[in-house]
């Protein structure tokens, strides 16, 4: 992306020098650090002075874009040149000419810069801020407030004119300086004796709070952060403690106050809220900085560093959150020829329907169909049947066995074609609270949204895009959905295997791993149940025979010792249950054991060793294999599939990588003669938990890749 850093430092290029001049400048070192950081993030960067030529300069650097193309962006550092509400000048121009930018809009900047208006809004929203008064002219009547007081200009930043006063004489002297130097009203504020706490924020809807920072003042000087301190002219050093030494409750209170202050003024992307903490543990908002300093030693960058964002990551993160706020679509295709191809048509179709795709994800997510919930699965099946009928996909009776698996096909059938595979059931236990759909600028949340719901929407709109171009019926294509993922494909495995054997390529719509990684190899998983039983025994009764519970624990430890990183074997206990009569020790032990493996022959060897460990004992012992999910091995056909998707990812500038995974999937059921790639759903995290979510941008990116791949099959 093209990113223009717009700042104010030395230019006075205006039609007339008129009105209140800006006294605030940004350092060249900071501009260079931001520029270097953005370049490190892969952006094309240019620094531009924010004066009357700004529109021409921006238009030259980032010309008007065609529909569907992501525009460039301004990284706004502009303090303005002169006049009122100077922080709003460049954002106002950018709003007018239609260029997206990092940071708050004109309204939020205007409210934040006017400290009196901001404090009134804080009060209206129930946010704590010190008592205050406004002095409009030098002949003011002294406010009825207790000393000491703070005086500062009403609409300035960086602590210009800030001073503590202890009596009326000092008040009149300090106010007179502000009237003369800044020609504006004076804000008088009750001084809060205590500690100074800053909380930075980054992002939107809602923003994330950075770790609070405490400013520690050296003894002997005023305990306020002055302009001289900020410009290192005061002769003293200010230390920054991050995170601030606050208890958990106070830490959360500070973050909550900062978040509410950010939202009450309508800020965007970033801000810093300055507070004071008195001895009684009360926090008071002093002001909000809608254009927080990105200087190397500023509290905002220190907090970001503590949160894991070094400077390069911080500035690129600011571009990312602004991008999500404005458009959040994948990068446009690179222009290869002037001829409009079908791929561009797919791109346009999907980009124009991004909101509809997310709406469909919401509809699916709000339908609960957990494993073992026949009512929910039935409702999901009916929805899917209606969709396939609308897309003119025909039921494939040979590979349908309700209520466990359903398959549809195009008129061209699936023989030597493509099979898309997903599952309708959500493998979450019945005791887990249901999580409906919600979203923020970067992620979509909800039950099963990664493993099932977003892939369902992907398939729908990939097929719709092809049907809109009258290409769908020409593709040898099948869509298979099963409903026993939560019980390891116990009933669907044979049909999945048989259908996959007919297809040339199988695409499993499981979620992609973080880093936009598809899966080309997966381990297998075997589940065992060990049951051991002995006669009931009282506590303390003498016996030469070991208690059955201790015996089982020893055998489970022996199982675990069979694990081998070298052979890619992992063995673990997933749970233990005991049966016992009142006043007696457990007499029956049931343990669930997981065996993860890469090669079936090694798994068979482990099976034999486990049985040897428990056989020949004087207990009633049974080791039962309850389920097995075969591994997905590497194969040449998989590599060919991967290359196809890599090629389309490069054309459309979409991040795409691959890796192996410890977790099994239906990909292990695909016969060796067929190519298979797994993890072609959107990027997801916290899978199978209440916090499961998918990356919004990856939904569109992965749908585009799938559509482009299917489209290519029409030419073969």
Image: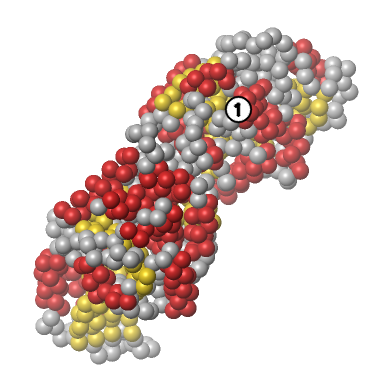
> Does 645 sit left or right of 100 as displayed?
left
Instruction: Say above or below: 31 vs 241.
Output: above
Residue 279: horizontal and vertical position, in percent?
66, 39
Residue 559: horizontal and vertical position, in percent?
18, 69
Q: Nearer the viewer, residue 214 or 594?
A: 594
Measuring 55% from the left and 24% from the top, which residue is drawn there?
A: 77
Q: Nearer the viewer, residue 477 or 605?
A: 477
The answer to which image quadrant residue 340 occupies is top left
Residue carrying label 1: 97
The quarter of the image holding the N terminus is top left
Q: Is residue 335 visible?
A: no
Measuring 58% from the left and 31% from the top, which residue is drawn there?
A: 98
The answer to which image quadrant residue 283 occupies is top right
Q: Nearer the viewer, residue 139 or 259?
A: 259
Instruction: Say above or below: 48 vs 586.
Output: above
> Does 485 sit left or right of 65 as displayed?
left
Q: Dot 1, how many residues are within 10 Å of its Cα: few (below 14), some (14-19), or many (20+)? A: few
Q: Is residue 171 visible?
A: yes
Measuring 67% from the left and 10% from the top, which residue is drawn there?
A: 15
């Amino acid at each position: 992306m093209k990113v223009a850093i717009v700042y104010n430092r030395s230019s006075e290029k205006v039609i007339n020098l008129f009105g209140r001049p800006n006294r605030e400048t940004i350092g060249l070192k900071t501009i260079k650090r931001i520029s270097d950081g953005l370049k490190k993030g892969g952006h094309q960067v240019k620094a531009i002075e924010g004066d009357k030529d700004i529109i021409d300069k921006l238009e030259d650097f980032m010309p008007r874009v065609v529909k569907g193309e992501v525009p460039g962006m301004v990284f706004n550092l502009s303090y303005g040149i002169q006049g009122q509400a100077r922080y709003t000048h460049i954002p106002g121009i950018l709003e007018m000419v239609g260029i997206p930018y990092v940071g708050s809009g004109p309204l939020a900047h205007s409210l934040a810069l006017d400290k009196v208006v901001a404090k009134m809004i804080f009060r209206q929203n129930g946010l704590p801020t010190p008592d205050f008064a406004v002095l409009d002219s030098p002949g003011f009547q002294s406010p009825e407030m207790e000393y000491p007081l703070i005086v500062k200009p009403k609409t300035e930043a960086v602590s210009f004119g800030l001073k503590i006063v202890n009596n009326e004489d000092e008040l009149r002297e300090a106010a007179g300086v502000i009237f003369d130097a800044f020609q504006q009203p004076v804000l008088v504020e009750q001084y809060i004796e205590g500690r100074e706490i800053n909380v930075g924020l980054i992002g939107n809807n809602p923003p994330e709070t950075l770790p609070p920072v405490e400013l520690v003042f050296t003894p002997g000087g005023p305990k306020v952060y002055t302009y001289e301190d900020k410009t290192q002219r005061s002769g003293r050093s200010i230390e920054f403690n991050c995170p601030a030494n606050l208890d958990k409750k106070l830490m959360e209170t500070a973050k909550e106050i900062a978040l509410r202050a950010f939202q009450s003024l309508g800020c965007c992307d970033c801000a810093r809220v300055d507070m004071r903490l008195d001895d009684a543990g009360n926090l008071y908002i002093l002001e909000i900085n809608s254009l927080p300093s990105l200087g190397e030693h500023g509290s905002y960058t220190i907090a970001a560093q503590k949160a894991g964002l070094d400077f390069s990551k911080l500035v690129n993160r600011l571009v990312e959150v602004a991008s999500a706020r404005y458009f959040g679509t994948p990068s446009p295709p690179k222009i290869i020829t002037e001829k409009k191809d079908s791929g561009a048509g797919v791109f346009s179709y999907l980009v124009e329907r991004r909101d509809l795709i997310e709406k469909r994800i919401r509809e699916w997510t709000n339908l609960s169909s957990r494993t073992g919930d026949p009512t929910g699965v039935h409702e999901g099946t009916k929805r899917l049947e209606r969709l396939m009928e609308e897309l003119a996909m025909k039921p494939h009776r040979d590979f349908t066995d309700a209520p466990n698996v359903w398959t549809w096909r195009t008129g061209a059938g699936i023989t030597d074609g493509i099979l898309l595979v997903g599952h309708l059931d959500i493998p979450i236990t019945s005791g887990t609270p249901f999580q409906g759909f919600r979203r923020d600028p970067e992620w979509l949340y909800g039950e099963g949204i990664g493993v099932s719901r977003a892939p369902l929407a992907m398939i729908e709109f990939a097929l719709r895009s092809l049907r809109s171009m009258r290409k769908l019926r020409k593709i040898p294509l099948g869509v298979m959905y099963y409903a026993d993922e939560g019980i390891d494909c116990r009933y669907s495995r044979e049909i999945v295997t048989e259908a996959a054997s007919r297809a040339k390529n199988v695409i499993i719509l499981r979620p992609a791993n973080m880093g936009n990684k598809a899966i080309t190899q997966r381990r297998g998983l075997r589940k065992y149940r060990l049951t051991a039983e002995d006669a009931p025994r009282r506590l303390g009764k003498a016996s030469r025979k070991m208690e059955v519970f201790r015996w089982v624990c020893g055998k489970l430890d022996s199982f675990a010792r069979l694990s081998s990183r070298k052979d890619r074997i992992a063995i673990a206990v997933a749970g233990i249950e005991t049966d016992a009569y009142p006043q007696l020790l457990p007499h029956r032990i049931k343990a669930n054991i997981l065996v993860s493996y890469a090669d079936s022959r090694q798994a068979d060897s482990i099976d034999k060793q486990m049985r040897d460990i428990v056989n020949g004992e004087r207990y009633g012992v049974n080791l039962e294999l309850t389920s097995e999910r075969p591994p997905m091995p590497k194969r040449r056909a998989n590599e060919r599939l991967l290359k196809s998707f890599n090629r389309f990812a490069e054309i459309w500038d979409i991040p795409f990588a691959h890796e192996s995974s410890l977790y099994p999937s239906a990909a292990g059921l695909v016969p060796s003669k067929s190519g298979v790639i797994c993890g072609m759903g959107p990027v997801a995290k916290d899978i199978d938990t209440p916090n499961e979510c998918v990356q919004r941008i990856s939904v569109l990116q992965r749908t585009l890749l799938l559509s482009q791949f299917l489209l290519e099959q029409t030419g073969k």
